[in-house]
Image (tube, rainbow, N blue to C red):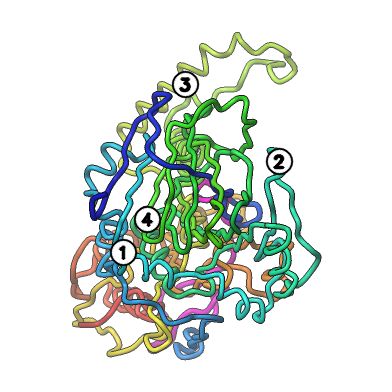
């Protein structure tokens, strides 16, 4: 075998590569009432900007004025568990460099041309440094200390086993006891599924935060630990793009042709329906596997191997063109109807009472064509809900407690200051109706949302009916609210490497300083 081997094949039956496979469900728990990119983020009050704030003051949430120091008080917490990692084999210089180093030696262009959403990719590495680094990300031996942090069945850990082609859940009630967990692992041959380990492991936090910047989509993870001669889950497919990193031991995998290409939901498939594997292989420490959503798969730990540990990194759930259209079309219809009287005409009398509405399809087709024409002639397309869902639930920057992004530093921005946007990947601009105005006619405002104050502890863990929510740790929306007249100036800052405050496209120096001070207080710009 070569030093680094990639096993590549397309989908015709019988094209399996050497060795076996099987694996557990890769679906990350999603925030309740939301989805991984296409969900609806709950709107909560965010910082409001008055026309002329007092010098040195920053608008507080709800439109009131508060001191800068109080508004941005640091809340840096030590991670619950971070063990020393081996020297990283990944490049954290940028999101692009991180992804390139993750799939190495495959080139980025080749990956997206030949594999992404198309077929699996197996990268087998005979590299002790990569294997040691992967092993440091998460190990079976880490569970004892993690259980002391207050883990709960269902929320943090699932215990399961595949029996006669079905998933058997072996969870107990309440808090996880390590001795009981180890007993189920050893005696019942149960698989341990650990949800969202990036909450505890800083190296995974770093990896997933960079991948969220790279993909512009939420990135979750699960760790699966399976004893020898056992299988955790039956053959199934997921609704996420999957990257598998083998951390400890070996795992025997089998992949099958999708019955639903690029599936939008998780589903178990019976053995008699899936046919023969298209790919079969063994993953060893340091190996990487990618496969698209909809790929049917199963995995087991071979006899003679004490256990297998792998981490599944998942992304692109509900992040398709269909999801984007569902998000964007309501705003497009609303805006177009202001200008096009055809969209404002009444539907036929008693249309809503009819069983068969086939007669109106021609009219709907005509209106959709008018919408398409309007879209081609428009400068911007609203898609605020998907944007807000992503920015609200993604990981904050991983800078460590010695470099707290929540506290602004350096000089205050003045009219002659040169400023630069920072944390570009962690902030978005949207235009939407004023959330704080209850009047029937709500004027449009500019909102700047950011993820700098998001909580690592709640990443991908939901917002309702769980312990995190009960403890008051549910994710909130953070950002600023401006009059629509500030939009061009904000675009200036976002599109320029640097800009002088006095050059901002606003009518008065007071507005220019107000904008700069507001962004500086949220740590979104730095003064050069």
Residue drawn at the location 41% of the way across and 25% of the way down: 14
Q: Earlier in the sequence, mark 2 or mark 4?
A: 2
Image position of 117 (left or right of 175): left
Q: Position of residue 51 (x, y in %)?
A: 42, 73
User: Distance from label 2 to label 3 (Cα)?
Assistant: 48 Å
Q: Are marks 3 and 1 in contact (CB under 8 Å)?
A: no
Where does label 3 land, which residue?
367
The boundaries of the magenta stretch are 35-64
Label 1: which residue? 490
* Other residues around mark 4 within 10 Å, as few (<14) / some (14–19) / many (≥20): many
Residue situated in front as seen by the camera: 215 or 60? 215
Contact (Cβ within 8 Å) of mark 2 with mark 1: no
Label placed on residue 243: none
In the rendered view of the protein, which quadrant contains the C terminus?
bottom left
* Left or right for 115, reference 228: left
Towards the viewer: 165 or 156:
165
Which residue corresponds to mark 4? 287
């Amino acid at each position: 075998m070569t030093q680094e081997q990639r096993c590549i094949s397309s989908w015709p039956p019988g094209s399996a590569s050497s060795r076996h496979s099987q694996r557990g469900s890769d679906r990350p728990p999603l925030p309740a009432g939301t989805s991984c990119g296409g969900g609806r983020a709950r709107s909560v009050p965010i910082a409001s900007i008055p026309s002329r704030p007092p010098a040195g003051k920053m608008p507080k949430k709800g439109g009131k004025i508060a001191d800068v120091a109080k508004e941005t008080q640091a809340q840096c917490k030590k991670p619950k568990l971070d063990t020393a990692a081996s020297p990283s084999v990944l490049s954290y210089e940028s999101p692009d460099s991180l992804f390139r180093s993750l799939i190495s030696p495959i080139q980025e262009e080749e990956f997206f041309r030949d594999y992404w959403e198309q077929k699996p990719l197996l990268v087998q590495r005979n590299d002790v440094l990569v294997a040691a680094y992967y092993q440091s990300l998460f190990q079976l031996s880490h569970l004892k200390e993690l259980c002391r942090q207050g883990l709960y069945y269902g929320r943090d850990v699932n215990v399961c086993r595949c029996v006669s082609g079905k998933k058997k859940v072996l969870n107990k009630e309440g808090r996880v006891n390590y001795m009981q967990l180890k007993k189920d692992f050893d005696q019942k041959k149960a698989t341990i599924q650990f949800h969202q380990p990036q909450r505890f492991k800083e190296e995974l936090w770093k990896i997933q935060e960079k991948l969220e910047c790279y993909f512009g989509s939420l990135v979750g993870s699960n760790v699966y630990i399976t004893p020898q001669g056992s299988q955790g889950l039956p053959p199934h497919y997921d609704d996420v793009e999957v990257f598998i990193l083998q951390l400890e031991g070996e795992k025997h995998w089998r992949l099958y042709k999708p019955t639903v290409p690029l599936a939008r939901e998780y589903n178990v498939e019976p053995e008699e329906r899936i046919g023969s594997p298209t790919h079969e292989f063994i993953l060893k420490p340091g190996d990487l596997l990618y496969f698209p959503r909809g790929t049917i798969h199963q995995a087991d730990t071979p006899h003679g191997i004490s256990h297998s540990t792998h981490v599944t990194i998942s992304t692109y759930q509900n992040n398709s063109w269909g999801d984007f259209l569902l998000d964007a079309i309501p705003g497009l219809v609303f805006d177009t109807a202001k200008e096009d009287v055809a969209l404002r005409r009444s539907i036929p009398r008693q249309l809503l009472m009819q069983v068969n509405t086939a007669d109106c399809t021609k009219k709907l087709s005509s209106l959709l064509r008018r919408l398409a024409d309007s879209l081609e002639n428009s400068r911007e397309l609203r898609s605020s809900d998907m944007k807000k869902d992503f920015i609200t639930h993604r990981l904050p920057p991983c800078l460590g407690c010695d470099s707290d992004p929540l506290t602004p530093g350096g000089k205050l921005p003045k009219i002659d200051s040169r400023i630069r946007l920072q944390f570009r990947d962690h902030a978005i601009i949207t235009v939407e109706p004023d959330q704080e105005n209850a009047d029937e006619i709500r004027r449009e405002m500019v909102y700047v949302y950011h993820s700098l104050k998001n909580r690592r502890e709640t990443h991908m863990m939901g917002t309702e009916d769980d312990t995190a929510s009960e403890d008051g740790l549910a994710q909130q929306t953070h950002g600023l609210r401006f009059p629509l007249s500030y939009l061009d100036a904000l675009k200036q800052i976002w599109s320029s490497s640097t800009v002088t405050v006095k050059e901002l496209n606003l009518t008065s120096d007071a507005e220019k300083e107000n904008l700069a001070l507001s962004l500086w207080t949220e740590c979104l710009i730095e003064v050069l």
